[in-house]
Amino acid sequence: MIGRLNHVGVATPSIEDSVRLYRDVLGATKIHDKFALPAQGVWVCFVDLPNSQIELIEPLDETSPVAAWLKKNPRGGQHHICFEVEDIQAAAEEMKLKGAQVLGEPRIGAHGTPVIFVHPKDMGGVLVELMEPPRGRS
């Protein structure tokens, strides 16, 4: 079921500071514009890598789940990893059948495609996002 690693989500108190790190220290050359994703309570900015992406996420406000995460991890850090799956509904059902806790119902993620999250307690301590790949690419 698991497909390509799409991105690593990194929570940050400041996307601008993180962009400087990825650009000036690590040498990233393709950094997308920051945009709001109100349905998930975050600002998002993608950093393209040769084989994947980094998804920088910053809370929109204090009600964001990422704001709560940053209270425990004030400097930020790895928040989740995201793998592509062919069919999000089938993946959600398979995860449930295998005893994993799917957090909520499928919703549209930052790439404009359906996503689900699987609880870290069932994923070796890592929050896992599963997403359908953007159309035209699998």
Image (cartoon, rainbow, N blue to C red):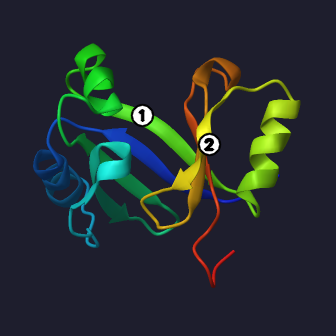
Q: Amino acid at mark 2?
A: Glu
**Label 2: which secondary element:** strand
- Left or right of 114 in this view: 59: left
Residue at point 35%, 41% (across, down): 10
5 shown above or below 128: below
Horizontal side, residue 5 vs residue 111: left or right:
right
Residue position for label 1:
79
Whether residue 75 appears in this view of the structure is yes
> Label 1's element?
strand
Q: Is residue 2 visible to the viewer in this orientation of the structure? A: no
**Left or right of 127 in this view: 48:** left
Q: Nearer the viewer, residue 53 or 92?
A: 92
At horizontal 59% and vertical 59% (from top left) the residue drawn is 114
Badge 1 crowding class, 10 Å Cα cut-off, few under 14, some 14 to 19, many 20 or more, is many
The picture places residue 44, in percent across and down from the top left corner, at: 29, 54
69 vs 58: above or below = above
Of the pair 32 and 119, the residue shown nearer to us? 119
Real-space Cα separation, disc 2 to disc 1, in angstroms: 19 Å
Residue 96 screen position, x and y as percent = 80, 32
Quarter of the image holding residue 122? top right
Question: Disc 2 vs disc 1: which is toward the camera?
Answer: 2
Image side of residue 62 versus residue 106, left or right? left
Rendered location of residue 100, percent (x, y)? 75, 26
Are the residues flagged by discs 2 and 1 in contact, CB closer than 8 Å?
no
Residue picked out by circle 2: 105
Q: Which residue is painted at 65% across and 63% down in the image? A: 132
Q: Position of residue 38 (x, y in %)?
A: 30, 51
Name the amino acid type tagged 1: His
Q: Examine the image and state in which quarter residue 116 appears.
A: top right
Up-down: is 85 above or below 136? above
What residue is drawn where x is 78% and y is 48%? 91
